[in-house]
Amino acid sequence: EAQVTQNPRYLITVTGKKLTVTCSQNMNHEYMSWYRQDPGLGLRQIYYSMNVEVTDKGDVPEGYKVSRKEKRNFPLILESPSPNQTSLYFCASSAGAWINNEQFFGPGTRLTVL
Amino acid sequence: QKEVEQDPGPLSVPEGAIVSLNCTYSNSAFQYFMWYRQYSRKGPELLMYTYSSGNKEDGRFTAQVDKSSKYISLFIRDSQPSDSATYLCAMKQGGKLIFGQGTELSVKP
């Protein structure tokens, strides 16, 4: 089944403790992206990657890191999480960055930073 | 000012009503316009996309873009309870995708 998977689905952590949220897709997609969703603010793009070893900042990259060493994986790294990073995170992928390349979203990761 | 503005609602309508959802934007460089639907506890899914001014129809859904006014709309005809979800407009510039805040829609039987 074609899908985007994220792990973990739920995470409660404490301020300053480094964490990684993994994202993997099995559709051989070139484009991958991370978003956070907060009430009243909608979805905001954190980072995106057009291909392996190519990443770029979205609208809200501060406090996050990403890497794209393999086509299928695009982990999101929080080196020193803070409470304002408490949010619902979505990973997405598409064949390319063109308009007719539909983005497929993962199930979401709900992160709470205490 | 946000690049994309969307009325968050919530919007509640009776079954069978025509629903109008709207977004305005400020960046003339946006090239492509999309509508996503997000059910509770799920990731968004693409509903419709367009890149030119005018209307695009798909079943009960019609997407409308007015680039001169920087305004896009989604119309849902004969709304059904299964249409109850959050609808997000999104606009694309290169690899960046900017979403509106989302409008929560509830269609009552």
Image: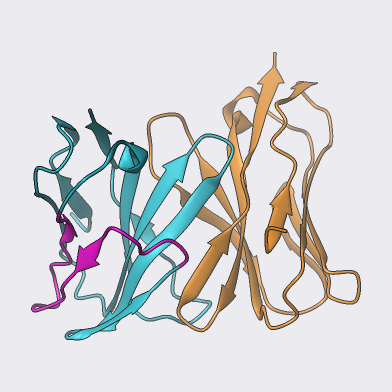
Chain colours: A cyan, B orange
Q: Does the magenta stretch include residue A60?
A: yes
> Residue B99 location, x and y as percent?
57, 57
The overriding secondary structure of the stretch rendered in magenta is loop
**Residue furthest right as drawn:** B69
Give left or right: position of B55 versus A13.
Answer: right
> Residue A40 location, x and y as percent?
59, 37
- Which stretch is magenta? A59-79
- When the figure is inspected, residue A7 is found, relative to residue B17, above or below; the finding is below
> Residue A15 location, x and y as percent?
18, 37
Seen at 21% across and 69% down, the residue is A27
- When the figure is inspected, residue B95 is found, relative to residue A34, above or below; the finding is below
Quadrant of the image occupied by residue A67: bottom left
- When the figure is inspected, residue A20 is found, relative to residue B25, above or below; the finding is above
Seen at 17% across and 84% down, the residue is A52
**Residue furthest top as drawn:** B109
Give left or right: position of A59 versus B76.
Answer: left
> Residue A20 location, x and y as percent?
11, 52
- When the figure is inspected, residue A28 is found, relative to residue B57, above or below; the finding is below
Question: Looking at the figure, which quarter contains the C terminus of chain A?
Answer: top left
Seen at 53% across and 77% down, the residue is A99
Q: Does the magenta stretch include residue A30?
A: no
Quadrant of the image occupied by residue A83: top left
Quadrant of the image occupied by residue A87: top left
